[in-house]
Image: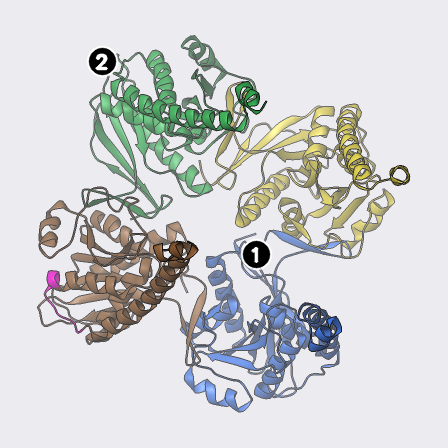
Chain colours: A green, B brown, C yellow, D blue
């Protein structure tokens, strides 16, 4: 295998497609969102990208191995604009590898005449949250207003450390190659896999691109996570109750 | 020396050969198994593979140095199918290096018209074990049934993290080049060098390929390890006895 | 994007220009100094240097992303000698990357017929300081005397560990390509961002190259840092007072 | 600068020269030995080797910078065989870098028609030692006997972990290119710079190659280190005396 290989698994004809990227990251928000699209609508696997920059690893499913790669699935939507959904189990394992792989992803996008990119991910808040805001970052100031219209927030100096990895480079390298890029970052605690944050990101994407998904399965996963969170909070509460004696406790001493 | 060099040490004519790989890993299962084959049957060193991806190191034996490499030995068996046994003291030192070296190993296999690969290794269970199961993973679903017939287990979602390193890539990259690949993973605690696990893997390989080895030396090593394990367990038992007082201890208080 | 790309943003005609480098390092002295020049005098962005050796990252300002790069700004001074000011948010992320990027910076310098380089930075003293000496290091012994005349100190065996990173290589690789290079290192504690050290370095550079800057904004930042340092020292003093009882305390016992 | 550059500083005509390598390592034995040769006999700097695999760093001496490199000095001896002494402040910073640099060193050796290599270094014993044995390792069994005649020891399975870095690769890669290589490893505690171990290695090299050095300066450094060791041992002894009371101490209590 060469250092980088792009397998053309199938050819499809798409209408004005946009690339939607969801790779592993904070709260698995990007992966959850991308995989939910592929679960809910019909798709065709069109490209696999293999690279020496991925971990030297195969996944095993029902005893059969498959080499680590990134997959690109074509999704034909009735709304008019089709999707190329890019997802996988791994990011690059080195700094330079992120550049190499992102360039390959942009090559694939270009070969399908994609002009717009959406990088999906999470932004950590450091605490459990109720309201799931979606932060935005774009390659071009003109993209901000329509995104604000569908609920995306643009905050001064956020995210503070910039955007690292493939999501960041899709915009950074994409802009140099003439793509229009948007990064949608769902707020998430950063401690747990977060289906609610993925849902918030997808809500925005739906409104922006004009399609509709069924969310039953993602909401189920969100409820499971809520149960987990509920138990954690209960345990924390009990602990605090035990540590800080109430008035009743004090009266008892008297 | 170039970044990668393959020395042709000898040329041999083999009948329908299979590649058997055993490099350092969990419990040294793969190395023990590969080296036991070379101890028990006559073999010819046919290739040495040198690479900048190996550690910058020479081994010293009786004062004479030899540069780190992987060796491929040809084994002619009476059973009809010959072996190419690949073994060495080191794996690659970087992610990309695993890809580069595995490609070189597949080049060697191809040059001998190998069509089937067996990657030998261990899978850690995290505890001492009595029954040494051998897990399997294959490049092609059709390979599963005949392997189950000789006792290999295929379990859903195991090994959970996939297969990392040369063993994994031999299947992953091998499949892309048209090889049929099988990974045989002997269960092992993961804490100790494990000749019993290596024996379990070889038992399966023998049944699969139709050859027979003498196991006296490997069984001797296994017994030595059993002694070590026995002493560890005895010490643990004594410690527990001291910590958890028995009924007799309690009566003594009374 | 190739591994390294130099974007020509604008072309300018400069008079006998010198390259002034200020990248992140100890006390942010180099960056503070370089950025202060660009704040105080008119400049033209002439080059952007992108590289796989930078972190895979975009910065986000008012919602708009920009790919990590190093910028070179042209500054036309009335004094006769113009400046090329090189600055950015990141150094290279690997050993070899420092060589690659420094070579690129020297290519840019060469394309503007630069013959002299000034690398600005800090040298850590390990303690808070009052007098901000500026240490020098040069590619050519003949450069020492004129620098001593404007207050630069040259000390035997300092800095002890040599000069690491782009500042060091600008002199090391620059000398091999025929440039005359000077490294100006402001003493700084090494614990805090240090505008006073940056000012000390710029004072020397002004005297050496014959230009004058307004320092109000840098002095303001220095005062803010002084306040921070003052509070730290006060806290330390209080702590010491509490730990070491004074005579009064002892009398009280009596 | 290219990834690797070899500067030809001077050309000399040498008689049957051998390469003697002494780079930083355990106890600085190799560097001390190589540098002592250059201090005691007249030499000509003939080559400088620069590489992206060295740290991105300049040394500063009396204010003047010099880029990290390895130097090769020619030494013409009356004994008949001349030396090429290779030394420097740094080893390569990566695995692959050791291969690249050692290949370059062998290129230099080849260009001077060198056929024999001596790699000088230390082998750690883990404790302070009185008798400084010198261990050997060679590329060819035939080299062992003459080395044993001048006092070099060859021990089964030592050094246990093989020889790592440039010293190891000079033999490993050298053998592949037809050089005869010897590694001389002075025993040393591994905790301190060890001029006595360097002296032991040089004693062997002198006898082997038929030259004689003055050792006053190296013996002075050894004595200084002995003083340091003496003080450490005294402190350890006092501590033990305080911890383990002698019979006298006990009597005193009575």
Which residue shows up at 75% across the image and 35% down it?
Answer: C198
Extreme residue toward the top, this view = A149
The chain ID associated with circle 2 is A
Residue A177 appears in the picture as rendered: no
Location of residue B147 in the rendering, given as x and y in whole percent from the top left corner? 12, 54
Does residue B252 belong to the magenta stretch?
no
Front position in the image: B82 or C242: C242
Q: Quadrant of residue B81?
A: bottom left
Q: Quadrant of the C terminus of chain A?
A: top right
Quarter where residue C1 is shown: top left
Q: Which residue is mark 1?
A: D54
Q: Is residue D164 left or right of residue C84?
A: left
Question: What is the spatial separation of the Cα atoms under label 2 and label 1, in whole angstroms?
Answer: 58 Å
Residue drawn 73% across the image and 35% down it: C194
Residue range in magenta is: B207-214
Q: Residues within 10 Å of mark 2 (few under 14, many from 20)?
A: few
Left or right of residue B101: residue B120: left
* Residue B113 place in picture, x, y as percent: 16, 61
Tell me, yes or no, whether the two marked residues, 2 and 1, touch with CB atoms within 8 Å.
no
**Which SS class for mark 2?**
loop
Q: Which residue sits at x=65%, y=83%?
A: D77
- Residue A78 is tagged as 2
Compared with D9, A174 (above or below) is above
Q: List x then y, in percent, for residue B64.
A: 42, 79
The answer to whether D58 is drawn above or below residue A42 in the figure is: below
Q: Secondary structure at mark 1?
A: loop
């Amino acid at each position: 295998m060469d250092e980088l290989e792009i397998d053309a698994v199938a050819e499809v004809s798409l209408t004005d497609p946009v690339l939607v990227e969801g790779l592993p990251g904070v709260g698995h928000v990007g992966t959850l969102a991308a995989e939910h699209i592929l679960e809910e609508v019909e798709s065709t696997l069109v490209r696999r990208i293999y690279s020496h920059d991925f971990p030297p690893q195969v996944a095993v499913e029902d005893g059969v191995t498959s080499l680590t790669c990134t997959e690109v699935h074509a999704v034909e939507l009735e709304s008019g604009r089709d999707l190329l959904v890019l997802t996988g189990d791994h990011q690059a394992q080195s700094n330079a590898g992120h550049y190499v792989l992102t360039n390959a992803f942009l090559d694939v996008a270009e070969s399908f005449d994609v002009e717009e990119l959406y990088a999906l991910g999470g932004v950590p808040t450091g605490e459990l949250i109720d309201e799931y805001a979606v932060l935005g970052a774009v390659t071009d100031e003109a993209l901000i207003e329509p995104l604000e219209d569908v609920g995306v927030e643009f905050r001064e100096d956020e995210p503070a450390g910039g955007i690292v990895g493939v999501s960041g480079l899709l915009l950074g390298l994409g802009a140099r190659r003439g793509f229009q890029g948007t990064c949608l970052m769902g707020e998430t605690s950063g401690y747990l896999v977060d289906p609610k944050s993925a849902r918030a990101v997808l809500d925005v994407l739906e409104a922006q691109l004009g399609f509709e998904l069924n969310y039953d399965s993602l909401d189920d996963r969100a409820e499971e996570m809520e149960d987990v969170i509920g138990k954690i909070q209960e345990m924390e509460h009990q602990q605090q109750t035990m540590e800080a004696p109430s008035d009743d406790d004090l009266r008892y001493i008297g």
